[in-house]
Amino acid sequence: MLCEICQAKEAVFHLRQVIGKEEIELHLCESCAKLKGIEKSEQRLDFLISQLLTGMVDSKILRKKPTFELEKCPHCGQSLQAIKKHGMLGCSQCYLVFQKAVREYLKRLYGRVTHKGKLPAKLKSLKASLQDINSLKEELKQALEAEDYELAASLRDRINEISARVDKHEAGN
């Protein structure tokens, strides 16, 4: 079964939501599931419930009529032509309904579809520290799997050192 969002990869997540008498099923590939906030770690499934439920409702809207056929957003009534003319979406559902067209427009306009954003100088170092901790945790996991306990101890100490700095920074704010 193919993923219901990208229609390109094999679905590996099969979710069912029951609301009253109505049942919604959603079949996602791993990358689309990750975009919806669903991740599979070693022995458990992690997800943000709000993103999961929103994703299922979104998929229900998209299943009614294929995206390329929709002329208006079923949620707010905004047309693709109006979005192109004004450069603004009518609601959060417009992005999902007209996702392909919006992504192409952003790619043409900005050269990419992801927004990097800006951070205050104080938060840049905090963000870098948190990213360092995540990459060090991954290295620690690999070192433990390889039974390289000396490296693992060193990585653990670096994680603890960075974590202490992050905690100190957060306590100062």
Image (spheres, helix red, strand yellow):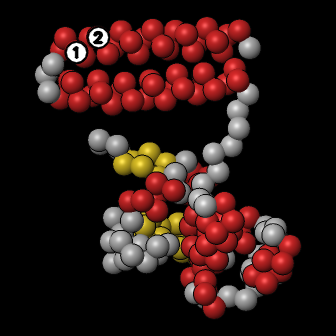
Residue at 33% across, 64% down:
12
Asked whether 170 or 102 is in front, the reply is: 102
* Percent coordinates x, y for residue 37 in the rendering: 52, 51
For image coordinates 79% across by 84% down, the residue present is 81
Q: Which of 13 and 29 lies nearest the eye of the viewer?
A: 29
Q: Secondary structure at mark 2?
A: helix
Q: Position of residue 79 (x, y in %)?
A: 79, 83
Q: Position of residue 16 (x, y in %)?
A: 47, 67
Does 28 sit above or below residue 123?
Answer: below
**Is disc 2 surrounded by few (<14), some (14 to 19) or many (20+) residues within 10 Å?**
few
In the orientation shown, which residue stands out farthest toward the left? Answer: 147
Marks 1 and 2 in Cβ contact (< 8 Å): yes
Q: Quadrant of the C terminus?
A: top right
Residue under numbered circle 2: 154
State how far apart marks 1 and 2 are (Cα). 5 Å
- Label 1: which secondary element: helix
- The image position of residue 103, as x and y in percent, is 62, 69
